[in-house]
Amino acid sequence: MKPLAIIISSPSGAGKTTLTTRLRERVPDLRFSVSHTTRPPRKGEEDGREYHFVSRQDFIDRVERGDFLEWAEVFGNLYGTSRAEFALAEGSRGIIFDIDHQGARQIKAAEPDLTSVFVIPPSMAALLERLRGRASEDEATVWKRYAEARREIEHYGMFDYLLVNDDLEVATNQLISIFLAEECRRGRNAHIAEALLSKTPTPTSLGQSTLPPGSSRPGTLVSGTLTASPHSSSPLAAGSLGAASLDSEKDPA
Ligand code: ADP
Ligand code: 5GP
């Protein structure tokens, strides 16, 4: 089974790093896609953990070699997701990409099944407070990121989910819920249903003697309740309420 891939985007400072970290604490075996970037590390960031920190020339060489699944320039720095990073997620439960809307569009084009979440702050005042509260950048950088927020928010319409990060605990639970719900998508679990079906005898291959005494065959009306199975060969299975199929008395079995 392919790992569940989730993109998380937001204007800078809205809380996607915080939410991603909390999601990974609560949902085991989730990988974080470590991007390459030309921006210098912030205090506390480690090469290979938050990012692979590389020079601009190194980044450009990688672009020319076709190493990236997507890449973009954000706030004057280059950021990219390497194909190798995506391949590393093979066998894990899921992978999270913390990338901007340009990267989200590129990855979605290559991997249409991917789920995308856009995180917004409850207000612009809260965003500014969070950018300042992070205390890892000077005031000019804070303002640059704040000024870019509107341009980033304009792209919210291309994402599958819009998560308002007001109360952190609520937003964390919402992100976890999105992940768990996406795991239950029919397409992801269809193979399990199909395996069950392939190992289960069809109603017609079931002799009546195998049914417990007093039980009805599928496709009959029991106390006014339709008991058709979608896999039954009964005319009721197709949803048609044919007179013959309703007449259980005529059924010799
Ligand atoms: P991003 O990764 O989107 O740039 P961060 O996760 O680094 O944002 O969060 C920016 C700052 O906001 C951090 O200091 C973080 O602790 C704080 N923060 C995140 N979510 C909330 C929240 N719901 N309420 C208050 N502060 C928050
Ligand atoms: P920061 O410098 O705050 O870590 O990230 C700045 C912006 O770059 C954020 O919007 C973040 O999502 C985005 N970003 C981080 N890594 C990548 C990447 O690999 N590709 C793209 N397109 N954007 C990225």
Image (cartoon, rainbow, N blue to C red):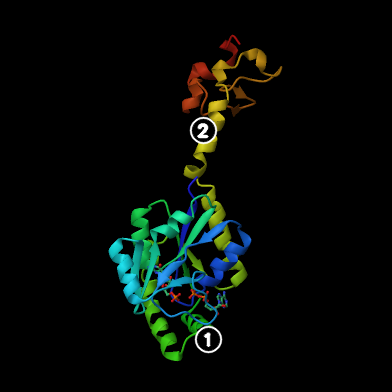
Q: Which residue lies furthest to the top in this view?
A: 252
Q: Which residue lies furthest to the right in this view?
A: 213
Q: Which numbered disc flags the more N-terminal residue, 2 or 1?
A: 1
**Depth check: 230 or 184 in front?**
184
Task: For the residues labelled 2 and 1, say whether their Cβ atoms are less than 8 Å apart.
Answer: no
Query: Is residue 160 something one can see in this rendering?
Result: no
Query: Is residue 139 something one can see in this rendering?
Result: yes
Q: Report the residue at 58% width, 63% height from top.
A: 23
> Is residue 9 placed above or below 110 in the rendered structure?
below
Is disc 2 surrounded by few (<14), some (14 to 19) or many (20+) residues within 10 Å? few
Q: Does the numbered disc 1 mark a residue whose Cβ is under 8 Å from ligand 1?
A: yes
Cα–Cα gap, marks 2 and 1:
53 Å
Residue 137 drawn at (x, y percent):
47, 86
SS at mark 2?
Answer: helix
- Residue designated by label 2: 194
Q: Report the residue at 44% width, 60% height from top.
A: 85
Picture mark count: 2
Q: Is residue 203 left or right of residue 5?
A: right
Q: Which amino acid does label 2 sit on?
A: Glu
- Residue designated by label 1: 135
Q: Which amino acid does label 1 sit on?
A: Ala
Residue 54 drawn at (x, y percent):
40, 74
Residue 101 drawn at (x, y percent):
37, 67
Q: Report the residue at 61% width, 11% height from top.
A: 253
SS at mark 1?
Answer: loop
